[in-house]
């Protein structure tokens, strides 16, 4: 029978393999190191706003025949007034992973359900106001509950979690497939530091038209083992009244030209599933839909 217990440091290699197996199903060519996984169990440096609100965190694993076949990371948020109202006195399954049945690890679905029961029991002992769940891993594009993890979704739904948030489309492009910058009279480009990376602002006749921001460090090089050549779009904005004039493609061309100099060959983008126009713009520019991810799950 499988056994559910707290994570031990000796589990680190098997847990990292489990994390990387799920990351690989979402975004190609990305994997995380053991150090990345261990660090993320203690704090989430990218979540600089919400992570300080966490009062308690625990990682549980389900072991079967000395194999870690499932794992989950739980967070408890403080109940004081300094915590944002949406997070105040809540509990969350930050991520839940399990390996579908294999010949060497039979009946792992039972282990996954046993682990989920342990997660719900822990949330009950915390006596939190509401219970949430997600699938946020310490890797680019692995957040929410990606459609590539139907086995995880099935465990959530059996346990009573329901999708209550938004759906996002994750897109990926090879820089070789993006537009090349072309000179245009009266159009200039300014490169500056933006809120979410390097910003490229287009000016037409001296007036700003729009901007794009690209982040060349989505993978934190000191923590990730393999994510070289990857960047993502932090912001893409066109001013009011300037849509439909191909400015988005010109901004993408400027950003892609810069990223090639940085040794980047792939670019990630994120759009709300409701923003059909934004998705179409990226598809026409050379992006491909990688997956869809459902954010925010709540326990009934």
Image (cartoon, rainbow, N blue to C red):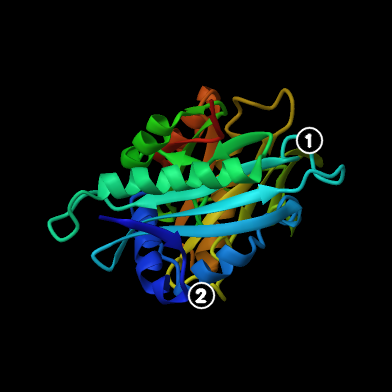
Residue 35 - label:
2
SS state under label 2: helix
Residue 85 - label:
1
Is 2 placed left or right of 136 in the picture?
A: left
245 vs 266, nearest the viewer: 266
Is 253 placed left or right of 17 in the picture?
A: right
Residue positioned most to the left: 103
Is 256 placed left or right of 156 in the picture?
A: right
Q: Tell me where residue 115 appears, x and y as whole percent.
A: 40, 49
Q: Is there CB contact under 8 Å for labels 1 and 2?
A: no
Q: Number of marks in the image?
A: 2
76 vs 49, nearest the viewer: 76
Give the residue displayed 48% in from the left and 60% down from the top.
Answer: 230
Q: Which one is in front in this view, the residue at disc 1 or the one at disc 2?
A: 1
Q: Tell me where residue 273 appears, x and y as whole percent.
A: 50, 27
- Res. 116 visible in picture: yes
1 or 2: tag closer to the N-terminus: 2
Mark 2 nearby-residue class (10 Å; few <14, some 14–19, many ≥20): some
Give the residue displayed 49% in from the left and 31% down from the top.
Answer: 279
């Amino acid at each position: 029978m499988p056994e559910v217990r707290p994570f031990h440091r000796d589990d680190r290699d098997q847990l990292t393999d489990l994390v990387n197996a799920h990351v690989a199903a979402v975004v190609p060519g990305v994997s995380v190191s053991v150090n990345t996984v261990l660090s993320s169990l203690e704090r989430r440096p990218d979540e600089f706003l919400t992570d300080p609100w966490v009062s308690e965190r625990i990682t549980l694993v389900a072991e079967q025949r000395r194999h870690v076949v499932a794992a989950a990371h739980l967070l408890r948020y403080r109940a004081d007034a300094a915590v944002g109202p949406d997070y105040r006195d809540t509990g969350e399954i930050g991520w839940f992973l399990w390996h579908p049945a294999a010949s060497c690890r039979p009946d792992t679905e039972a282990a996954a359900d046993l682990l989920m029961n342990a997660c719900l029991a822990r949330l009950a002992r915390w006596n939190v106001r509401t219970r949430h769940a997600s699938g946020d891993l310490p890797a680019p594009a692995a957040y929410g509950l990606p459609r590539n993890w139907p086995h995880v979704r099935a465990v959530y739904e059996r346990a009573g979690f329901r999708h209550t948030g938004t759906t996002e489309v994750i897109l990926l492009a090879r820089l070789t497939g993006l537009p090349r910058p072309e000179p245009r009279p009266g159009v200039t480009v300014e490169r500056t530091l933006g809120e979410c990376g390097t910003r490229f602002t287009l000016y037409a006749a001296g007036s700003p038209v729009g901007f794009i921001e690209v982040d060349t460090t989505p993978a934190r090089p000191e923590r990730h083992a393999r994510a070289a050549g990857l960047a993502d779009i932090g912001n893409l904005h066109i001013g009011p009244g300037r849509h439909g004039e191909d400015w988005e493609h010109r901004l993408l061309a400027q950003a892609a030209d810069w990223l090639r100099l940085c040794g980047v060959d792939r670019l990630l983008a994120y759009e709300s599933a409701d923003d059909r126009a934004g998705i179409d713009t990226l598809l026409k520019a050379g992006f491909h839909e990688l997956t869809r991810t459902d954010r925010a799950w709540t326990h009934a």
